[in-house]
Amino acid sequence: MTVYLNGRFLPLAEARISPLDRGFLFGDGVYEVIPVYSRRPFRLDEHLSRLQTSLDGIHLPNPLSLEGWRTMIGQLVASADFVDQSVLLQVTRGADDKRDHAFPQGVAPTVFAFTAPLVTPSDATRAAGIAAITAPDTRWQRCDLKTISLLANVLARQQAVDAGAVETLLLRDGLLTEGAASSIFVVSEGVLLAPPKDHRVLPGITYDLVLELAARHGVSYAVRDISERELRAADELWMTSSTKEILPIVRLDGLPVGHGRPGPLAQQMYAWYRAFRD
Ligand code: PDD
């Protein structure tokens, strides 16, 4: 497998990052995950724009121009021997020989990218829907930045796996924020509800696309706070992300969501998503 590291394409086995890298020592960096269908990066400009926002949010200058990112990603995608891919981009504040929390001076960032086969949910999983649990959102107050400091997300996701579920829906101050690694939508009395994009959630690229498709196809929707009570009374629940696309949640904390089967709007939205994507 070929990876990109600091300006070079090289085999994964030859890619070396210092143990003093601040990504390793402090989780001091940001990342993106970009789906690629038939070697075409999907919503690339949106992902690169969110990467810029994340870099700005941690005061790290963008190491590449927009064109530089596009060219590098194009080369990486072309080098793989599979066509549907998931490209990871990661930028950290680099390796410094002192371990000091404050930013180092004159240190080059570490820029890493690799591509793996895109694994989306199978048709059977999509048709059956998945189980989710809820947990308190213990993350920090800048969840709008896509940082590599993911420990709270890791612990939340593992909680789901330990419970035999797929995703953990996070609740902060009695309100739904998002999933451990996904955005969450609620359908209630025919209206599609989405939590607002603020510091409590990652501004999902798939989230934006779902709302665009809702507007385009005349689905009534509202972007507003969603209470735990509304979450538990939902007719439909969906998780969305670049790798899971749109996936219905049919059980929450062991209880059925709606009728306990994927709802009609989830199926319709996925059909619109596929038509848009292909
Ligand atoms: N995660 N919220 C969180 C916390 C996420 O980690 C993700 C995606 C999303 C959905 O965002 P998008 O639609 O832009 O993929 C929401 C990626 C896939 C990951 O960490 O692997």
Image (cartoon, rainbow, N blue to C red):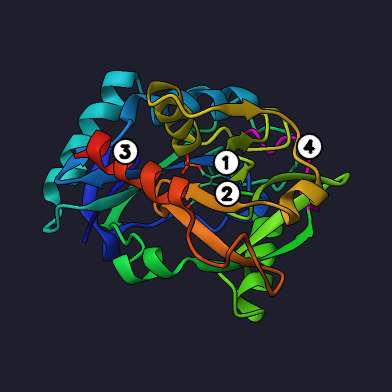
Could you say where residue 255 lies in the image, as x and y percent from the top left?
Answer: 69, 71
> Label 2 vs label 3: CA separation?
38 Å
Pick whichever of labels 2 and 4 is earlier in the sequence: 2
Question: In the visual, does 22 lie left or right of 198?
Answer: left
Pick whichever of labels 1 and 3 is earlier in the sequence: 1
Pick whichever of labels 1 and 4 is earlier in the sequence: 1
Q: Secondary structure at mark 4?
A: loop
Residue labelled with disc 4: 141
> Label 1 vs label 3: CA separation?
34 Å
User: What segment carries the magenta color?
Assistant: 137-145
> Label 2 vs label 1: CA separation?
6 Å
Q: Secondary structure at mark 3?
A: helix
Q: Tell me the tag on residue 272.
A: 3
Name the foreground residue: 239 vs 56. Answer: 239
Q: Is residue 141 in the magenta section?
A: yes
Question: In the visual, does 77 lie left or right of 124?
Answer: left
Amino acid at the residue labelled 4: Gln
Residue labelled with disc 2: 23
Amino acid at the residue labelled 1: Gly
Give the quarter of the image for residue 164. bottom right
Q: Is residue 106 visible?
A: no
Foreground mark, 2 or 4, reads: 4
Query: Dot 1: few (<14), some (14–19), or many (≥20) neighbours within 10 Å?
Result: many
The secondary structure making up most of the magenta span is loop
Q: Tell me the tag on residue 93.
A: none
> Label 2 vs label 4: CA separation?
20 Å
Query: Dot 3: few (<14), some (14–19), or many (≥20) neighbours within 10 Å?
Result: some
Could you say where residue 211 lies in the image, as x and y percent from the top left?
Answer: 48, 29
> Label 3 vs label 4: CA separation?
33 Å
Residue labelled with disc 1: 29
